[in-house]
Image: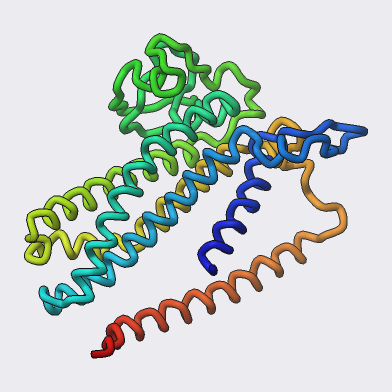
Amino acid sequence: MVALGATISAFWILVANSWQQTPAGHIVVNGRAELVDFWAAVFNPSTLPRFFHTLTATLIAGAFFVAGIATYYLLKNSSHLFGRKAMKLAVILGLFASVIQVFPFGHWHGQQVAATQPEKFAAIMGIYSTETKAPVVLFAVPVDKPPELKARIQIPGLLSWLAFGDVNAPIKGLDEFHRDEVPPLFLTFVSYHNMVVLGMWFILVMGLAAFFLWKDTLWERNWLLKALLWSIPLPVLASQLGWIAAEVGRQPWTVYRLLRTEHSVSVTVSAETVLFAIIVFFVIYAAMGFTYLYLVAKKVKQGPEPTGA
């Protein structure tokens, strides 16, 4: 029930965020957005792609968390029954979630961004001038002034095909937009591409683990078990990188093409009050985080409770 409640809560949080990305179901009256279609606002163009992409990310994080703890037991005793059962569950779910995160959900989300937020898409993908047969950039060093990508490694035409199903489809470049409506280039590009690299790592590690699990030799592959153990925080990092790409890529808008971030500053709440609130939240969440890690580590060291005869 806790998991169900958290999932429902996540949906409505993502509805609010998605409306900021792709607002719908409203009219603007005297400079104020007023709701006219509740369901259009809830199921705006980015709600479902964002929800399933985020939900799958949490499943990946959970799978690696379980796999890492199972590894802790298996490295101490390769025949540990609890460790083996937990590892099987984590690897099966982790591989499945890692694959569907890329396709269909990541692909779906990418197509939605290409269709509804073209300047964000161009910044994320490093498309600085309009191109047909636009490439997928596998690696590059982005430079802001002038906007360009150095040391490119790319696959020509693949981005056009992925975004619009046509290798010859044009992709709008950043030169098509006013300079003050273009998001920060370096952070958007780098955060997205590092998220993708981590996504490929998850598929690779879980794929190898699934193969050796099928061969019943996973328990003997200490190098792979250690890779699973050290990968515990990486899905959380990938999620943070994804949100950086999403939120920095939305700039300079608080609500896309309706309200600029510079116009969203409160006239009644001072900067000092905002800073104080941020510090308080940081202290509280840091304390909760350290307490959580301490209790989890303590429980893991204690080991699973013995089952009844």
Question: Image point 32% across, 43% down: which residue?
Answer: 99
Question: Which of the 4 quarters of the picture holds residue 88?
Answer: bottom left
User: Residue at 50% across / 42% down in the picture?
Assistant: 245
* Left or right of residue 279, residue 96 in this image: left
Inspect this view and state whether residue 301 appears. Answer: no
Measured along the vertical axis of the image, is residue 278 above or below residue 8?
below
In the rendered image, which quarter is residue 227 located in? bottom left
Q: Position of residue 220 (x, y in %)?
A: 7, 65
Residue 186, percent across and down?
47, 37
Task: State which quarter of the image contains the C terminus.
Answer: bottom left
Quadrant placement of the N terminus:
bottom right
Q: Quadrant of residue 31?
A: top right
Residue 45 is situated, as x and y percent measured from the top left of the image, at 61, 32
Numbered circles on residues, count? 0
Camera-nearest residue between 3 and 19? 3
Residue at point 37%, 34% (across, down): 141
